[in-house]
Amino acid sequence: MTETEDRQTKDLQRIRELTGAPALRGTASVDRCWNALRLKMNRMRRRRRAVHALRNAAAILFIPMLAGGLLYLQFVERRAGSIPVEQISIMSAYGQISKIVLPDLSEVWLNSGSTLTYPQRFTGRRRTVRLAGEAYFAVSADASRRFDVQTDDGLTVSACGTEFNVNAYADDSAMKITLAKGRIEVSSPWMHAPALLNPGQQLACSRLDHTVACADVSLYVETAWREGKLIFRRAGMAEIVRQLSRRFNVDIRLEGRDLHDYEYSATFTTESIHEILSLLEKSAPIRCLMIEPRQNSDFAYTKRTVVIRPKK
């Protein structure tokens, strides 16, 4: 056999090994193949049974775990409810108007010389704050938790979500509650039943005899202080003096009973105390004397004082 024939013979043998009949590659055993297939099927059945058992066990364990988690959350909530909530007090300095955002996102404008006290977080069924002075409230709506404003005199203004003004300065003879939007309820120990207000109405509660009167008012006049304005509409001199004292942190004294009979109408925005007093002198027969602060023996300074007298 030549070298070429020997190479061709080896190539043919190689082709038979790769693509030849089963007889050339060995005879397959039917029993052996069936046993192998059966073992594989058994392993698959056992694996499915194990997965199913694990799934059932997880479902059974999930229920007590969920119950335990809920009990833990209730315990945490009760524990948090038993911890005293820190109270925050904000005072608006004289001559300043402060804006506050409460934990429930309600907004409050605090007038000059006023103090608002509220909790660091609201808990329970009511959102309660305390006011000394004057403030305008824009309450976030929440029908499930009423919003209460309490004053030192025992007056309570309740709402679920609305806007209103509370004027409760301690040196005023009456407290005034003015509703801008929505609906509010006003109650106190001396009122036989809570009073309900409609927008544009004002409830005046006398500190002297606890009488209550409701009337329609101008919302612009009653709430313009938020914009830094002082608005007087036929206001008596005593009322003018009170508002100027708070706005500019000065002591103002009226000398002469006739001064209380004067009425004044004006709107002040950016005027200083000197400019306002000058305008008052031009509109009425009065004279205003400004006494500047002086230093005491303890090195503290007195407040500026204004004396208003009839012009002779």
Image: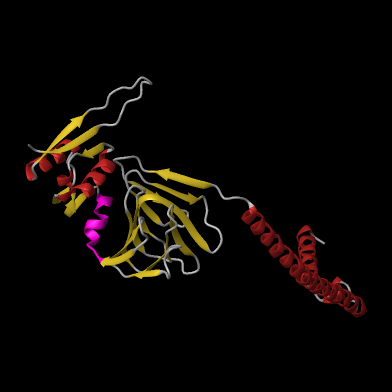
Q: Is residue 125 visible?
A: yes
**Percent position of residue 200, x then y:** 27, 66
**Percent position of residue 201, x then y:** 28, 66
Closer to the camera, 180 or 21? 180
Closer to the camera, 113 or 124? 113
For residue 123, which quarter of the picture? bottom right
**Percent position of residue 74, x then y:** 67, 62
**Percent position of residue 306, x then y:** 21, 35
Q: Is residue 233 above or below residue 242?
A: below
| Residue for point 41% across, 57% down | 106
For residue 196, which quarter of the picture? bottom left
29 with respect to 260 (left or right): right
93 with respect to 264 (left or right): right
Residue lying at the far right in this picture: please name it.
31
| Residue for point 46% across, 69% down | 143
For residue 77, which quarter of the picture? bottom right
What segment is highlighted magenta in the picture? 216-227
